[in-house]
Image: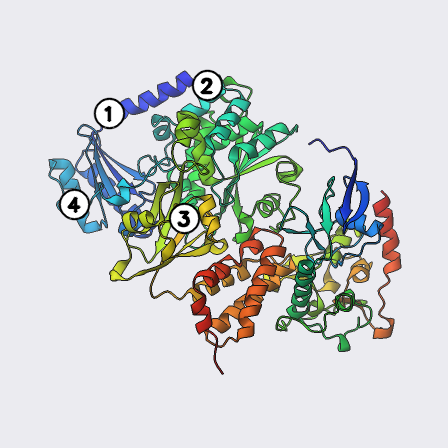
Amino acid sequence: MINSLEELEALANTKRCNEQNCQEELRVCVGSSCASLGSENLKEILDAAIKENDISDACRVKAVGCNGLCAKAPLISHCNRATKISILYEEVEEADLDELIQSVLNAAPVTHKHCDITQDFFAAQTKIVLENAGIIDPDDIEDYIAHDGYKTLFETLENKLPNEVIEEIKKSGLRGRGGGGFYTGLKWESVAKVQSEQKYIICNGDEGDPGAFMDRALMEADPHRILEGMALAGYACGADKGYIYVRAEYPIAVEKLTRAIKQAKKLGILGENIAHSNFSFNVEIRLGAGAFVCGEATALITSIEGNRGNPRQKPPHLSDYGLFGQPTVLNNVETLANIVPILKRGAQWFKSIGTASSSGTKVFALTGHIQNSGLVEVAMGTTLRTLIYKIGGGIPHGKKFKAIQTGGPSGGCIPESLLDLEVDYESLKKVGSIMGSGGMIVMDEDANMVELARFFMDFCKSESCGKCTPCRVGTVQLTELLDKFVHKKATKKDLELLQNLSHVVKDTSLCGLGQSAPNPVLSTLKYFENEYLEGISND
Amino acid sequence: MIREKVRVKSFKINGIDVTGASNQTILEIAQENNIEISTLCYLKGLSCVGSCRMCIVEVKGSDKLIPSCTSKIKEGMEVTTDSARIKANREMILSMLFSERTHTCSVCVSNGNCELQDKSTELRLEHSQVPYGHARFEIDASHKNFVNDPNRCILCSRCIRVCDEIEGAHALDLMGRGMDTRIIHDMDEPWAESLSCTSCGKCVYVCPTGALYEKDISAEEAEKKRNIIMELLERKVEQ
């Protein structure tokens, strides 16, 4: 049990000392992309080889979370503590492991499969949320503590009042990373102000946008940081109970979080009277059962309550009437992962990153027709051009860029003419898209925008809960209309109906799913109307 | 949670000055003042879910359309219930309801006693603005007195709410999602085999369409016995 800041630091020091003897470290990425290419098997082989060569004192094999460059998976990095040199190897196969072990034994570097860590993909990023990803072992709470983990929580419990925490978050200008962009500090304040016996903190890990895997990677790579963020939110708002709602399709994230909670409870970092203070905080995991709509705030709490995950009309807002009717804070995974760095380094520092209206960084999942698909974190205000060409490495096969889709099924498409757009909440909204949770799908010249709109509408159709009329029927009607355009059998009247229906669904749907479902249609209509006109048959 | 004290609020609906208690909804105040707002899923005495979206209204200062049945009144708000935009949206929503399943009035047992039909008369909707879908669902006629025909269901959830909130049985609920959503008994058992159904018939009497109806009656007799249930619902409101 850790009862004070001193004890926490003592544990961190012990861990650091123990590792000092171990000069070399092989970090095998076991994030989803790497794991799908057998990186866990690679780790086992390395483990066995280390044992066989009897160098387990000098070299450690560590399973770590996502490095970001998923296009080059599996990734293994070789770090030397003394020389502070770290080499990243890409697309590692079983056959390469012998050479890797030899390099550890003889200090003879492997000559091929080097991944240049000075390249723009890494250099142009600003890592705050992902600073520990690919470095710490998510299964080991001590490793997190050795990297100053839970220090912020203990320091805050000792030195800060709840309202000081809220003040700091408010000053930082942190906004919800789930897509809405509501100011986190204000959200916390509204819950903190309500007097109630019971309040809740919920972490929304129900990431369901096609092409988005930011929260997944975060939960898998650094689960303790999310727990620490939740505990701090609990302290600030006066809540003693937290829920993490994770979709069941993320089994590794669930496993890592479950283990993290167990470890934190065992050390007394979560539980009753943390660090001998009056503050108690417990966290439980709830699994989603495969409904996209459960990422919506009111549907999510209904689902946690054990009911069918249908959304309900707001207001009342969650700060008044949330989970089990109690005041509730619902934050996205990435938002909560930002809490620790803000409190550690101060609101001023956080505010200095990003744009005036959107401070800090944003994690994006770059996918589609792009060289370096993967997970990236950039300062708000980074241009799309930097994201696509500098970090993303451009479009493969020498093809031309056509459009980028942000915000998943709720977002829109942005054409080439707007590539110099500085990405933040406002700018994306202005051009008819949204920040969303951070999925970015890049499309080359061959992409058919009508088909894309149809894909997302079909997605919304099958994910509509069926509660309100416009979303339930409208998404079906819109999908069928878009079908006509894809098969070039539409009429001029269909185009009119498409626009009309899109606006009705957007304006009258009950929850965010329906209200934003027509966005892909409306934005492609705005920038690629000619493709819709091509879908109109002349006869 | 501190519950706000009930206060009197004055505001405007369609330019008419009205007052109400702060825990009342726009729809309630409109009805008290004989200002008509179209509704379908709403039924006085049952909880409000805002699912049909027929009762949408505009509030000055916001470009959103909000359901009046779930929106609490606010001091000084200016509500519009019949702008061209609202009418256009309402017509499209009603069209969607008609297009969704199979609403053929001429062969329906509820012809002449149907709230969906009444709405089309009220809005003067002569045809659906969107193509008909004609989804096909199996009919459950297992119960000795009643029939459940999902093909005429508009998913207003009145039956679920009355069974849960008035009868206290909660024999009904939803299954599936999106267009495939349908009303089921217990764990999707045939109605006759439902152990929690008390065969009270409240669900049938609150159903706005011919989705739930009594057996062995002609369309002429198919008037829903609303007065029995309305009395219970009135009592509930008074509580």
Same chain check for tags 3 and 1: yes
Which numbered tag is attached to residue A20? Answer: 1
Q: Which residue is mark 2?
A: A3
> Hey, what amino acid is under mark 4?
Asp
Q: Position of residue B22 (x, y in %)?
A: 77, 39
> Hey, what amino acid is under mark 2?
Asn
Q: CA distance from mark 3 to mark 1?
A: 34 Å
The residue at 43%/24% (across/down) is: A152
Quarter placement of the N terminus of chain A: top left
Q: CA distance from mark 4 to mark 2?
A: 45 Å
The disc, 3 or 1, on the residue closer to the chain's N-terminal end is: 1
Relative to the observer, which residue lies in front, A16 or A437? A437
> Hey, what amino acid is under mark 1?
Gln
> Hey, what amino acid is under mark 3?
Phe
Which numbered tag is attached to residue A213? Answer: 3
User: Which chain is home to disc 2?
Assistant: A
Q: CA distance from mark 3 to mark 2?
A: 36 Å
Q: Which residue is mark 4?
A: A98
The residue at 77%/54% (across/down) is: B162
Residue, far front = B15
Numbered disc 3: secondary structure: loop
Q: Mark 4 near mark 2, Cβ–Cβ under 8 Å?
A: no
Q: Residues within 10 Å of mark 3 (few under 14, many from 20)?
A: many
The disc, 4 or 1, on the residue closer to the chain's N-terminal end is: 1
